[in-house]
Amino acid sequence: MTENIDPRTDPQFKALMQVMQDITSNKVPFYEPHELAARSTLRALQHQIDDRNVLDDSDLIDTLNQARIEVKYLCSIITDLKERLAERDSEIGRLEKLAHRAY
C-alpha cells in the first residue's frame, strides 16, 4: 500500500523538512565529541544516583555526585583548552602573515 506523498499537506514530510531546515540553519546545537561522551556519562551517573538515592544515603551517593562534578569540570577544561588553541592558531596565522609581509 504505497501512497503518493503530497509534500504540501503531509505532516510527516513537513516535520522532516523543518528538522532539515533547523539543521542547515545551525539551530541545532553542535556538540564536540568530548561533550557527547560527557553528557552520556553524566546521564548514566544521574540515573545511578536517582536509583540509589531512594534506598539509602550512603558514601556511594556522595562518590557518584563527586564523579559528576569532576566530569563536568574536566569537560569545561577541555572546552577552555580548545578555545585557547583556536586563539593561539589564529595568532600564529597573524604573525606568519606579518613575517611574510616583512620579507
Image (tube, helix red, strand yellow):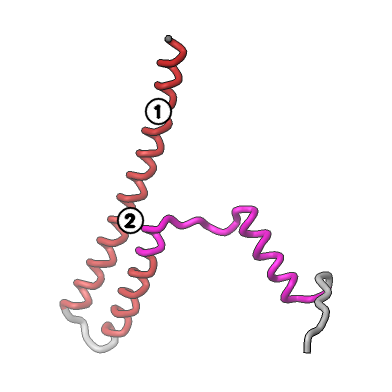
| Residue name at image x 46 percent, y 13 percent | 101
- Indicate which disc residue 75 carries: 2
Q: What stretch is highlighted in magenta?
A: 9-38
The foreground one among 1 and 98 is: 1
Q: Which amino acid does label 2 sit on?
A: Cys
- Give the image quarter of residue 89: top left
Q: Name the residue under label 1.
A: 91
- Give the image quarter of residue 16: bottom right
- Indicate which disc residue 74 carries: none
Q: State the SS at label 2.
A: helix
Q: State the SS at label 1.
A: helix
Residue 7 x, y percent position in the rendering: 81, 71
Left or right: 12 as drawn, with respect to 6: left
| Residue name at image x 74 percent, y 72 percent | 13
The foreground one among 58 and 87 is: 87
Residue 78 x, y percent position in the rendering: 32, 50
- Give the image quarter of residue 96: top left
SS majority, magenta: helix
Residue 26 x, y percent position in the rendering: 60, 53
Tell me the crowding category of disc 2: few under 14, some 14 to 19, or many 20 or more residues within 10 angstroms, Cα based.
some
| Residue name at image x 36 percent, y 64 percent | 37
Between marks 2 and 1, how big is the CA–CA gap?
24 Å
Q: In this view, does 34 lie above or below 45?
A: above
Which quadrant, please, contains the C terminus? top left
Q: What residue type is labelled 1?
A: Glu
